[in-house]
Image (tube, helix red, strand yellow):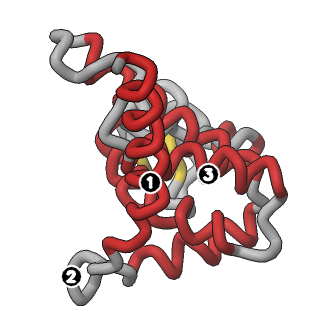
Amino acid sequence: MKKCPRCLKYDSDEIRFCRHCNTELFFEERFEIKSKPTFKQRAKQLKTDIPAVFLALRHKKTPLLAKIIAGVAVAYTLSPIDLIPDFIPLLGLLDDIIIVPALIVFVVKLTPPDVFAECRKEAEGLWAEGKPKKWYYAIPIMAVWGLLIFLIMKLIF
């Protein structure tokens, strides 16, 4: 299918001129026009990228910097404490909407494409039987926050 540069409609590959506006259809052959993904498509991609980031964190071929940023992204997502508390209207949710996807984008950019494609493929079927029941991954995060609360209480009293 060729896309007409003038009327933006598609025609078959056999014809040379657009049936709608009579424009020559050689433009698509020389320059490939890629449309940007919509917000909805990016949100769907993010849904599979979040578990893929977790899998990339454990992958041997993932660079160290990508693993560190992936660890920060997973810890920030699972942590009950945010940079801006959620009870502040609009700003509390805005940091979750901006920070977590930005960290995921950094991990995707830093991870080799073949490694992340493998992690995405594995992440697609990750929750086929339901959500994972490995709650013990949260123990280190709870231990750090418990230690912080203990130290703050010790300073106050």
Residue 143 lies, with reference to residue 48, above or below; the image says above
Residue that appears at 60% across and 52% down? 71
Residue furthest out toward the bottom: 129
Q: SS class of the residue under badge 3?
A: helix
Q: Nearer the viewer, residue 149 or 66?
A: 149
Residue 157 lies, with reference to residue 103, above or below; the image says above
Q: Nearer the viewer, residue 82 or 58?
A: 82
Question: On the picture, is 133 further left or further right than 42?
Answer: left
Residue that appears at 83% across and 58% down? 63
Q: Which mark is on residue 143? A: 1
Distance CA(mark 3)–CA(mark 1): 20 Å
Residue that appears at 63% across and 77% down? 118
The answer to whether marks 1 and 2 mark residues whose Cβ atoms lie closer than 8 Å is: no
The answer to whether marks 3 and 1 mark residues whose Cβ atoms lie closer than 8 Å is: no
**Mark 1, residues whose alpha carbon is within 10 Å: few (<14), some, or many (≥20)?**
few
Residue 51, position as x, y percentages in the image = 45, 65
Residue 153, position as x, y percentages in the image = 36, 27
Query: Label 2 belongs to which residue?
Result: 130
- Image quarter in which the C terminus is found: top left
**Mark 3, residues whose alpha carbon is within 10 Å: few (<14), some, or many (≥20)?**
many
